[in-house]
Amino acid sequence: MRTQPVQEREADAGLGSREFELLLSGIASDFIGLPLGALDDRVVDALRRIVLAFDLDRSTISEADVPVAELRVTHSWARPGVATQLPRGRTALSFPWAEMRLRQGLPVVFSSLADLPAEAAVDRASYAHIGLRAHVAMPIRVGDALVSVHSFGMVRAERDWPAPTLARMRLLANVFGSLFARKLAQESMEEQRAFDALLVDVSTALASAAGERADSALRRACEDAGAFLHADRLTLYRADPASGRLSSVHAWRASGVDTLAPAEPAPEAMRAVLDGRIVRTGSADHP
């Protein structure tokens, strides 16, 4: 077995049970009643305290972006000379083995790149590319969904991760999990209130509009709905059940988005819509 550097053994031993309890309770208490607007700075400060307490090089919180299979760094703190931001990219392509474990609710742990299994060959090359020599990644789940990952990294040297250290890291990740669960719940309520207000505004405008005013109201409704959904484009179609066709009535696009030539939806999509079914497509559904 590889011998752990003396200074790292002492650092682990130096964080006694009482010191860890104070660290954990201090971070947890800082998050109690914290307004969302003050969350970012407090999370970064908590990561700073964790790095110093565990003698790490970097600690990071990454958000799981499911549609694009990417873990996006949202909060990070690193020692001077160590990058806080990692190169962006699709995690499923650069770290397929690690992403699979995290989505299964399993941690990713290695003390050196040589510890990674054969099936993690792509991951090993990616970790080497970003200079990571030892790493722990704890999944943060809300319900059954992976929402974030709390990472603890070393770039200066390889590092053993004793079971008590991993247990402490799991407890810290759980604290962030509680915070993010509250954040998601609050954001969901705020989004629902905003959506309800949008429905009232659109319904009121359309109910009182007629003639040319109706067209103006529909255009405004498309614009407001597109902006609320953070969409690039939104198109309103008129259905003609007799011919089985959909024709574009109003179209909206966000600023900076190219205009597309008018086109009918695919025949399969038109039939589904006319049958009252919801049609969902993504980049994977197109060549």
Image: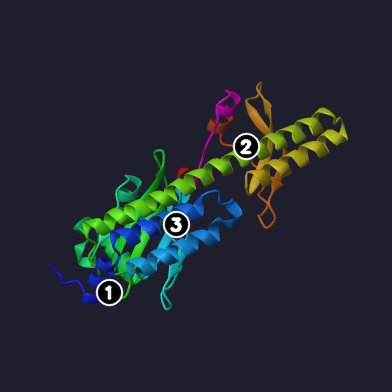
Q: Compare residues 90 and 109 and report the one nearer the observer.
A: 109
The residue lying furthest to the top in this view is 242
Mark positioned earlier in the residue sequence (3 or 1): 3
Q: Which picture quadrant has residue 26? A: bottom left
Determine if residue 170 is in view: yes
Q: Which picture quadrant has residue 211? A: top right
Q: Which mark is residue 192?
A: 2
Residue 233 drawn at (x, y percent): 65, 46
Q: Are marks 2 and 3 in contact (CB under 8 Å)?
A: no
Is 142 situated above or below 77?
above
Q: Main secondary structure of the magenta part?
A: loop
The residue lying furthest to the bottom in this view is 81
Which kind of residue does numbered mark 1 sit on? Ala
Q: Which residue in the protein does label 3 denote?
A: 27
Which kind of residue does numbered mark 3 sit on? Ile
Label 2 and label 1: CA atoms lie apart by 48 Å
